[in-house]
Image (cartoon, rainbow, N blue to C red):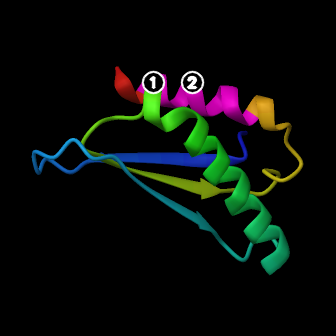
Amino acid sequence: MPGFVLLVRDRQDGTPDMRIGYTVTKKVGNAVVRNRMKRRLRELARALLPQNGIRGADHVLIGRNGGIERDFAQMKSELAKALAKVAR
């Protein structure tokens, strides 16, 4: 199971802007762990969304348990795979 969940919703408002949101619940850990997870999610989005994101859509990354322990390269490949699946 990946360390995050990706939700994508087309806004259908005619603008090509991509928006991104991040959320990590208290179930993941204390504030330090949640903020660290959000920093990892932001870096993933910074690396992959400009090329692989859906134009005119809202993207939400939800941090899950185990996301802190996962290898960053593995999470990056999982996000790329998820974005490719959504693009189809």
Would you place residue 83 above or below residue 43 in this image? above
For the question of whether residue 28 can be seen, the reply is no
Residue 13: in magenta span: no
Which residue in the protein does label 1 denote?
85
In the displayed structure image, the side of residue 20 where residue 38 appears, left or right: right
- Amino acid type for the residue under numbered disc 1: Lys
- Which residue is located at x 45 percent, y 34 percent? 50
Whether label 1 touches label 2, CB < 8 Å: yes
- Which residue is located at x 84 percent, y 53 percent? 68
In the displayed structure image, the side of residue 84 where residue 27 appears, left or right: right
- Which residue is located at x 74 percent, y 72 percent? 27
Disc 2 crowd rating (10 Å Cα; few below 14, some 14-19, many 20+) is few
Range of magenta residues: 75-85
Seen from the viewer's position, the closer of residues 68 and 17 is: 17
Secondary structure mostly seen in magenta is helix
Disc 1 crowd rating (10 Å Cα; few below 14, some 14-19, many 20+) is few
Element type at mark 2: helix
- Residue lying furthest right: 69
Name the spot of residue 54 as percent of width and height, x first: 34, 35
Which residue in the protein does label 2 denote?
81
Count of number-bearing discs: 2
For the question of whether residue 63 can be seen, the reply is yes
